[in-house]
Image: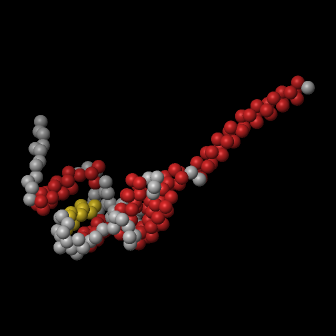
Amino acid sequence: MAGEHLVRLLQIAGAALGIPAAAAGTFAAYQNYFSTDVTCQKLRNDIIGIMERNVPPETKRSLLKKEVTEFDKLCGERDPEARVIFQAAFANFAPRAPSKVDFHKDDRPPLLIIGNGEDHTVPASVSKEAAKRFGRSKAVVDYKEFPGRPHFTAGAPGWEEVADYALEWATRHTGAPAEREEPVTA
């Protein structure tokens, strides 16, 4: 008799503990598979992954179109900062994108486009093509490629060469003298 009571007590205790555990498991499954936050994070990661892939531009365009459209539909209102970045990245592939570029604008300021030879996010060929398209206007457009440089050139060794070039270019095209600090010597 005492054994039956012990078994029943353990069953009741197990059921009492099992219900919250089951509820927690169900909630975890919901979060992992159905939550908008998880879906949006997955879409963000997918889009960034596509942007970093070293694939032909047509393939990248096709993959981005699907993912950016889905992100915009499901997550755009909740994550406006990411929406703007992804729309800008996809602007020239979407005919009526709010951030579409007018390559023929003749009255814009001078433009320097820099390509980096080891950039797999925005390959130098894409930067060069952008410079070519912008160059169809009457505005000043220059292209400079730095072989061996990655996408995040500002964080890579030797970034000073790129920065110095850009500063000198801007100085030539604005007429303003460049203010430079002299290097500190010991």
As drawn, is 118 to the left or to the right of 37? left
If the image is split into quadrants, where does the C terminus sit?
top left
Give the x, y percent position of residue 113: 24, 63
Q: In the image as oriented, which residue stretches furthest toward the bottom? A: 136
- Residue 166 versus residue 40: which sits nearer the camera? 40
> What residue sits 21% from the left and 56% below the top?
162
- Is 137 rendered above or below residue 168? below
- The quarter of the picture where residue 54 lies is bottom left
Q: In the image as oriented, which residue stretches furthest toward the right? A: 1
> What residue sits 15% from the left and 58% below the top?
170
Task: Inspect this view and state whether residue 46 appears.
Answer: no
If the image is split into quadrants, where does the N terminus sit?
top right
As drawn, is 23 to the left or to the right of 174? right
- The quarter of the picture where residue 110 lies is bottom left
> What residue sits 88% from the left and 24% below the top?
2
- The quarter of the picture where residue 6 lies is top right
Task: Inspect this view and state whether residue 27 appears.
Answer: yes
As drawn, is 25 to the left or to the right of 150? right
- Is 21 rendered above or below residue 127? above
